[in-house]
């Protein structure tokens, strides 16, 4: 039995459009309605054809939905929730795909006090944005974290979990606060550091931009991929998961300072010990299917 | 006309074995002699067959060479130079592939005072190590930086440049000191940061190792690739390019502190401005053929 029959997706960028395509591919009888605040995106989605209907307002998109998934930057969740409040069917479940979960739940509860809200976060993506960037297999083998609020109906969370399993994801259930801490380490801190180092390298006086680009295969280019991610999405993530990000940043800075000291004092053993330990982490990620085993990410040579 | 007829490669790991394979593929009449300090590696190379001869001592490998390339960690260059000093033909050129150039030149000059030394650095690699990890096309379209010491014969540097062009690389000539600064930004700092963050994520108490691995597709996994690079090689790089690495680290830390402050005070504009600027760097790297345009590095989904 399908977990939902009429799914509305608000925000038709990389993630929203990938969900729509994945639903089309795996649950073809489900009716998909889409809305995006940007008229050009709506127009493009009508051409791409992965929604059965694209509405000009958020309210119109939800009127007969049994699932509404908000795929907008986490800073916009409250405003979008307010836009659909009057039209949302009483039995619809509202979910989202945001990268911070406590803040989203707070924002949605404030504007949709009587709705069933089951936040979720598919840990998947690419550095590209917009409705053309999405694809049906984006969630295959990736994890989706469902964070049901305390006291919510278990059956509602299970329907959301089943929805994500149907479109290819593995599902974990987690407390929103713990989610925010875990993602601060595995996603938010890496993005912040990638953005920083790409900025640092761009601002050198002694080394030209052209040199940075030419010799980027020495390691730098790896960081530029995630530093090319959507600026609005990421600004919102950092502002909405502030405490956990600042805590992780503090730990990272301490560890970096220890390595800096080891380099300054010529303490090769400390460096060697860490560099050996980190190899094992890569191996585990590959063994658990969370990255390609191909060297250099399988880049063509 | 071939730049060299008898090439000796000392150190038969990822880079040394890739050079041998590339020479075999592009200059099949060149005689390749190899040596590695590790008897198991020598045995394996004899099986793999990309050297015409594998010698048990470094000295024996150079007796009739016109080019000797040292492909060992930068901290081992001096010792290997001393090993070949007595057997090195007077007209042979000694080169290397190390990631720091001032320290290598100093180390080699001390033990080979009358040899022609033309250091070089191919900016290419993967996270894998050992003779099985190499492949003939590793240098295709990558840059090799040749750093001839002041007062050296221009013809010698040109022969080294021609050698690298023959095996697929683009060649730039640079002052060793400037090389070390450029590579500190484009390679050494990225590696140091990747090693650090993978270490930080492994040492959490609130977040388990298993969670870090499961949700690594949120960005973290990208860092694990370069943090899986050879520990000995990288320990040596940091100890041998200390000043430039510490300077870059200082700049990075300042920039990270500014972002930390922006997050703490909710200054979204500063974040947004940086995140927009970094996108352009990625675009340039792709336009100049230094990375794949495919999203997510072309990982399979």
Image (cartoon, coloured by chain):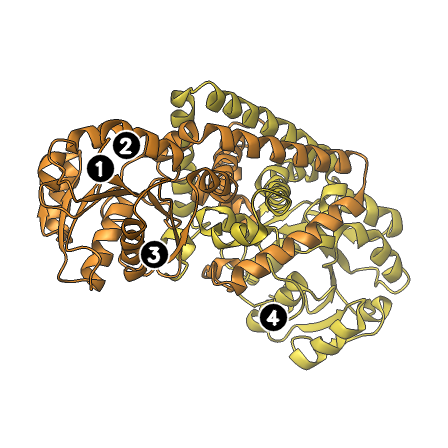
Chain colours: A yellow, B orange
Q: In the displayed structure, would residue B59 be above or below residue B223?
A: above
Give the secondary structure at mark 2: helix
* Dot label at residue B139: 3
Q: Chain of mark 3?
A: B
Residue A78 point in image, percent of width and height: 84, 52
* Dot label at residue B108: 2
Marks 3 and 4 sit apart, C-alpha to C-alpha, by 39 Å
Give the number of the mark in front: 2 or 3.
2
Marks 1 & 2, CB-CB < 8 Å contact:
yes
Give the secondary structure at mark 4: helix
Residue B35 point in image, percent of width and height: 15, 40
Give the number of the mark in front: 3 or 4.
3
Give a yes or no on whether discs 2 and 4 share a subunit.
no
Badge count: 4
> Residue shown at 57%/68% (left/top)?
A135
The residue to which callout 4 is attached is: A21
Marks 4 & 1, CB-CB < 8 Å contact:
no
Circle 1 residues within 10 Å: few <14, some 14–19, many ≥20: some
Marks 1 and 2 sit apart, C-alpha to C-alpha, by 9 Å
Determine whether, in the image, residue A215 is placed left or right of residue A79. left
């Amino acid at each position: 039995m399908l977990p939902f029959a009429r799914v509305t997706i608000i925000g038709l960028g990389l993630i929203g459009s990938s969900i729509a395509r994945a639903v089309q591919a795996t649950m073809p009888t489900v009716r998909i309605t889409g809305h995006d605040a940007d008229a050009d995106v709506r127009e493009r989605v009508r051409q791409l054809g992965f929604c059965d209907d694209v509405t000009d307002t958020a309210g119109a998109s939800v009127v007969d939905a049994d699932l509404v998934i908000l795929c907008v930057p986490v800073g916009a969740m409250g405003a979008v929730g307010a836009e659909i409040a009057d039209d949302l069917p009483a039995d619809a479940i509202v979910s989202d795909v945001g990268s911070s979960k406590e803040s989203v739940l707070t924002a949605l509860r404030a504007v949709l006090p009587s709705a069933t809200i089951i936040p979720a976060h598919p840990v998947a993506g690419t550095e590209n944005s917009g409705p053309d960037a999405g694809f049906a297999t984006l969630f295959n083998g990736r994890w989706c974290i469902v964070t049901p609020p305390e006291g919510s109906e278990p059956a509602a969370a299970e329907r959301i979990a089943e929805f994500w399993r149907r479109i290819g994801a593995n599902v974990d259930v987690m407390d929103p606060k713990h989610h925010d801490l875990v993602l601060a380490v595995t996603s938010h801190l890496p993005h912040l550091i990638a953005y920083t180092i790409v900025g640092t390298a761009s601002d050198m006086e002694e080394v030209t931009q052209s040199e940075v680009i030419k010799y980027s295969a020495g390691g730098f280019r790896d960081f530029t991929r995630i530093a090319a991610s959507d600026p609005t999405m990421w600004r919102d993530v950092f502002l909405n998961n502030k405490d956990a990000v600042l805590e992780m940043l503090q730990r990272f800075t301490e560890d970096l300072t220890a390595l800096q000291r080891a380099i300054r004092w010529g303490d090769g053993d400390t460096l060697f010990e860490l560099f050996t330990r980190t190899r094992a982490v890569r191996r585990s990620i590959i063994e658990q299917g969370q990255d390609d085993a191909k060297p250099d990410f399988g880049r063509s040579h």
